[in-house]
Image (spheres, rainbow, N blue to C red):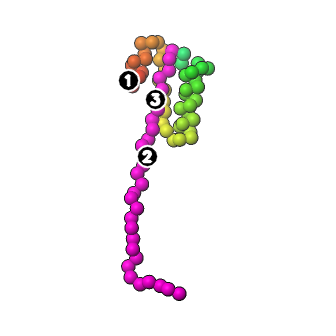
Amino acid sequence: MLSACGPAATTQAPAPTAAPKISVGMVTDTGGIDDKSFNNLSWQGVQKGISDLGISGKYLESHQQSDYAKNIQQ
């Protein structure tokens, strides 16, 4: 049996850094979020990212073409 006497050597590992939080913003066309097409499928993908990957996500609906630029800027 062997034993050692003296202070234990300690090393500190670098503190883990938190991964950056991913946030997804989606702007629909005038078809709305429930268009049973592109907008709806895109939103389903965002929702899967929220549940599976812990991202945050939201959408803005464009009711007319003039809403696009304003919604994208938000």
Judged from this view, the residue extending furthest toward the top is 65
Quarter of the picture holding the C terminus: top left
Relative to 1, does residue 37 appear above or below in the rendering? above
**Residue 46, percent from left and from top:** 53, 32
Q: Which mark is residue 19?
A: 2
Horizontal arrangement in the rendering, residue 1 relative to residue 16 (left or right):
right
Q: Earlier in the sequence, mark 2 or mark 3?
A: 2
Circle 1 sits in a helix, a strand or a loop, which is it?
helix
Q: Which residue is mark 1?
A: 73
Task: Answer whether residue 4 is magenta in the image.
Answer: yes
Label 1 vs label 2: CA separation?
25 Å
Q: Which residue is mark 3?
A: 25
Amino acid identity at mark 1: Gln
Residue at image position (56%, 41%) is: 52
Q: Earlier in the sequence, mark 3 or mark 1?
A: 3
Residues at badges 1 and 2 in contact (C-beta under 8 Å)? no
Label 2 vs label 3: CA separation?
19 Å
Amino acid identity at mark 2: Ala
Task: Classify 10 Å Cα crowding around label 1: few (below 14), some (14-19), many (20 and above).
Answer: few
